[in-house]
């Protein structure tokens, strides 16, 4: 069916008898898209997907060993609160824009609508950074789950924690998550809802057991004040700054509420609330978890250098014994598996939306939606495959995991903050949605932009000294590779045909398309 894109303002373009009754579908039509994905998620489910991807039992614990060597307890505990507060500014700024433009394209769609000049270029580069960050955060989450699972198998069954074994488990976990995400969005929503309670109750169980069972605990002066530097760098300030990666990596993925918004009821308010509440709940619960785990540390040096490669696992086993410690590890691994499943879901929606506008190679393949499941299955498999490729360097690079987490932080946060920067430039030209910050919108966006500028430089710096082939932080190479690829493609070809988010048609045409394809 031939479709001629109308202007963005479609009010009055068609008679009221053609407008969908559902306000979410109507708003999506006004933004130029058909309701292809099934809208069955509640506001709680939307919050749950972002909270699950933040996953304090994943990010906090998978990088806890990194934190023990890069600043120690003082940076782990206080850095969490500082980074969490600044992340809230980023989330608030994102949520306000999300309310105005509730589409699965999320950040790159926001950039296109807010840019006063060169909108297509802003959308192009925002989208590519978002894709990079989404793939990297999926890799980081599932790789973290693989390391914990390998540690458990090593402790209980002698399945040695080696790079090949970890990468094998990593691949199997990604396969599982891809399969789950091709079944149906209702299953994903159900598992995400279960995940919220798994995380909250799991944190309470872990902290209670670690508080009650061990006969001895570290003193408060150690938990809140001990500084540790095992990086090889002499500068205390530099090492403390590097240690913030633990918290900042954990506070990623909350853009999932935006990417799942075309499947959420009450999208213009539920999506923004999902973003903000996921950060707030994670900030409180994560701090409790970190304090509880740090009090339970025994032999600091031995646990930081645990042969399992997972210091939190060693801390738990040493503190409460093999049987109970194994039970706590199962709680952690379960949370990480929930987290990875949600990340693949959000990642695939970003790939779907970007491909819907023709911005990825072979876009027609990645944007296909299954008629029975109403899911972008091909995008799901691309998300899993891309994450697996990012994790492979661990076979020969001992700092690969820290690099993957840095890539996730930088890729995502650059994409997060571009719409906030453009919202600042737009000034009064920005029309807020039903969820907004009022006069605080611009100051909040300004703080968000400044913070992201700091971390974008910080997490590209070397994390260990001396810098060798085994300790090299390949984050700048990965970021430059994607930026170079997207930049060259833009200059050589895409600037001639990529116009940003494409309208699929007028409201009348979208209704006809939905009926023709069986979406209604």
Image (cartoon, helix red, strand yellow):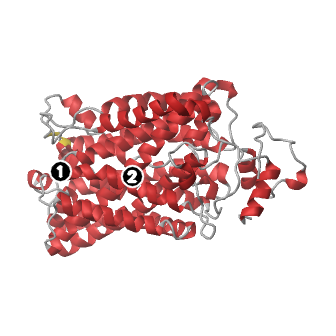
Q: Residue at x 26, y 45 (%)?
A: 402
Q: Residues within 10 Å of mark 2 (few under 14, many from 20)?
A: some
Residue 297: image x %, image y %?
17, 56
Nearer to us in this view, 237 or 216: 237
Tell me if 9 is positioned left or right of 355 in this view.
right
- In the picture, the disc for residue 382 is none
Residue 371: image x %, image y %?
63, 67
Nearer to us in this view, 105 or 245: 105
Residue 468's quadrant in the figure? Answer: top left
Classify 36 as above or below 426: below
Residue 90: image x %, image y %?
49, 38
Name the residue beneath numbered marker 2. Answer: 386
Tell me if 461 is positioned left or right of 366 in this view.
left
- SS at circle 1: loop
Which circle's residue, 2 or 1, is located before the other in the chain? 1
Name the residue beneath numbered marker 1. Answer: 219
Of tags 2 and 1, the one toward the viewer is 2
Q: Residues within 10 Å of mark 1 (few under 14, many from 20)?
A: few
């Amino acid at each position: 069916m031939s479709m001629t894109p109308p202007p963005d303002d479609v009010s009055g373009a068609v008679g009221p008898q053609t407008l969908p009754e559902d306000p979410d579908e109507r708003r999506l039509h006004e933004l130029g898209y058909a309701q292809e994905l099934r809208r069955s998620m509640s506001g709680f489910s939307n919050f749950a997907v972002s909270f699950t991807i933040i996953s304090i039992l994943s990010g906090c614990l998978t990088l806890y060993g990194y934190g023990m060597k890069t600043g120690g307890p003082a940076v782990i505990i206080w850095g969490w609160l500082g980074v969490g507060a600044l992340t809230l500014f980023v989330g608030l700024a994102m949520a306000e824009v999300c309310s105005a433009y509730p589409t699965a394209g999320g950040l790159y769609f926001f950039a296109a609508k807010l840019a006063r000049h060169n909108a297509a270029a802003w959308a192009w580069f925002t989208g590519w950074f978002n894709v990079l960050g989404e793939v990297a955060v999926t890799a980081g989450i599932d790789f973290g789950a693989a390391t914990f699972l390998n540690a458990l198998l090593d402790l209980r069954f002698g399945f040695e924690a080696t790079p090949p074994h970890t990468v094998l488990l990593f691949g199997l976990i990604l396969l599982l998550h891809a399969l789950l995400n091709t079944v149906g969005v209702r299953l994903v929503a159900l598992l995400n809802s279960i995940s919220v309670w798994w995380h909250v109750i799991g944190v309470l169980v872990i902290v209670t057991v670690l508080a009650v069972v061990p006969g001895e605990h570290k003193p408060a002066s150690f938990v809140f004040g001990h500084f540790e530097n095992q990086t090889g760098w002499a500068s205390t300030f530099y090492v403390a700054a590097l240690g913030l990666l633990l918290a900042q990596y954990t506070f990623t993925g909350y853009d999932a509420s935006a990417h799942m918004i075309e499947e959420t009821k009450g999208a213009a308010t539920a999506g923004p609330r999902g973003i903000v509440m996921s950060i707030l709940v994670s900030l409180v619960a994560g701090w409790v978890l970190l304090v509880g785990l740090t009090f339970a540390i025994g032999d600091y040096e031995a646990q930081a250098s645990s042969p399992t490669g997972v210091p939190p696992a060693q801390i738990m086993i040493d503190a409460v014994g093999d049987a109970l410690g194994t039970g706590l590890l199962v709680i952690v691994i379960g949370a990480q598996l929930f987290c990875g499943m949600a990340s693949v879901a959000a990642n695939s929606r970003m790939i779907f939306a970007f491909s819907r506008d023709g911005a990825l190679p072979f876009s027609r393949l990645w944007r296909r939606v299954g008629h029975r499941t109403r899911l972008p299955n091909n995008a799901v498999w691309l998300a899993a495959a891309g994450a697996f490729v990012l994790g492979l360097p661990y076979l020969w690079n001992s700092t690969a995991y820290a690099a993957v987490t840095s890539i996730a932080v930088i890729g995502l946060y650059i994409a997060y903050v571009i719409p906030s920067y453009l919202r600042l430039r737009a000034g009064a030209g920005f029309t807020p949605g039903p969820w907004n910050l009022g006069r605080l919108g611009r100051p909040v966006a300004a703080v968000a932009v400044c913070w992201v500028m700091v971390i974008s430089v910080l997490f590209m710096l070397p994390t260990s000294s001396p810098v060798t082939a085994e300790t090299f932080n390949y984050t700048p190479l990965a970021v430059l590779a994607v930026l170079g690829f997207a930049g060259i493609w833009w200059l050589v070809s895409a600037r001639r045909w990529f116009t940003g988010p494409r309208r699929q048609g007028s409201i009348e045409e979208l209704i006809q398309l939905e009926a023709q394809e069986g979406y209604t």
